[in-house]
Image (cartoon, rainbow, N blue to C red):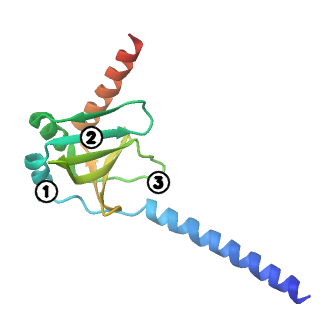
């Protein structure tokens, strides 16, 4: 009889732990982050000499190393806070670099309803900014050009 109670209590404890874990995931996906400071974006615009784009759902990656292209990409980061939705999935990751060192790393969300960046520091999500319309158009054009190139 005591073994039956022990087994029942163990199952109850596991069920409670599972419920607690799913709540933690839900609360993390609904978390609001501060926008990345404007000063930090200005530093990126001035110091970044290379951007690496890695896309999760496409069979290519790309990079930028021309100053004007880099500034245009940085300008695609809005000063508005990201409207994070738990249903949105990241489409890729972007690395802003200077002299071979990563200055800033971010996940990219590219759906029209989920167009934003979530920035990382030391592997943790720290800031999130909405993407500008021009920023989203840039990625849309990149994917269209990639499809056209594949079709040739």
Label 1 to label 3: alpha-carbon separation: 26 Å
Q: Report whether 131 appears left or right of 110.
A: left
* Residue bearing mark 2: 52
Q: Position of residue 139 (x, y in %)?
A: 30, 33
In the drawing, what numbered circle is on residue 56? none
**What residue is at 35 percent from the left and 40 percent from the top?**
54
- Callout 3: few (<14), some (14-19), or many (20+) C-alpha neighbours within 10 Å? some
* Residue bearing mark 1: 38
Label 3 to label 2: alpha-carbon separation: 26 Å
* Residue bearing mark 3: 86
Asked where in the image residue 150 lies, by quadrant, the reply is top left
Q: Is residue 87 above or below residue 135?
A: below
Label 1 to label 2: alpha-carbon separation: 21 Å
**What residue is at 41 percent from the left and 46 percent from the top?**
90
Q: Is residue 9 above or below residue 17?
A: below
Question: Element under label 2?
Answer: strand
Mark 3 or 2 closer to N-term?
2
Residue lying at the far top in this picture: please name it.
Answer: 152
Residue lying at the far front in this picture: please name it.
Answer: 100
Q: Position of residue 149 (x, y in %)?
A: 35, 16
**What residue is at 77 percent from the left and 82 percent from the top?**
9
Indicate which label's residue lies in the foreground, 1 or 2: 2
Front residue of this view, candidates 91 and 105? 105
């Amino acid at each position: 009889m005591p073994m039956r109670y022990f087994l029942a209590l163990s199952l109850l404890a596991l069920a409670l732990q599972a419920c607690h874990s799913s709540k933690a995931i839900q609360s993390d996906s609904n978390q609001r982050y501060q926008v990345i400071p404007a000063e930090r974006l200005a530093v990126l615009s001035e110091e970044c000499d290379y951007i690496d784009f890695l896309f999760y759902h496409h069979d290519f990656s790309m990079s930028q190393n021309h100053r004007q292209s880099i500034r245009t990409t940085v300008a695609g980061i809005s000063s508005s806070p990201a409207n994070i939705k738990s249903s949105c999935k990241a489409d890729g990751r972007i690395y802003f670099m200077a002299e071979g060192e990563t200055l800033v790393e971010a996940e990219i969300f590219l759906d029209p309803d989920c167009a934003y960046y979530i920035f990382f520091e030391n592997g943790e999500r720290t800031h999130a900014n909405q993407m500008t319309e021009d920023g989203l158009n840039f990625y849309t054009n990149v994917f269209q050009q990639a499809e056209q190139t594949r079709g040739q």
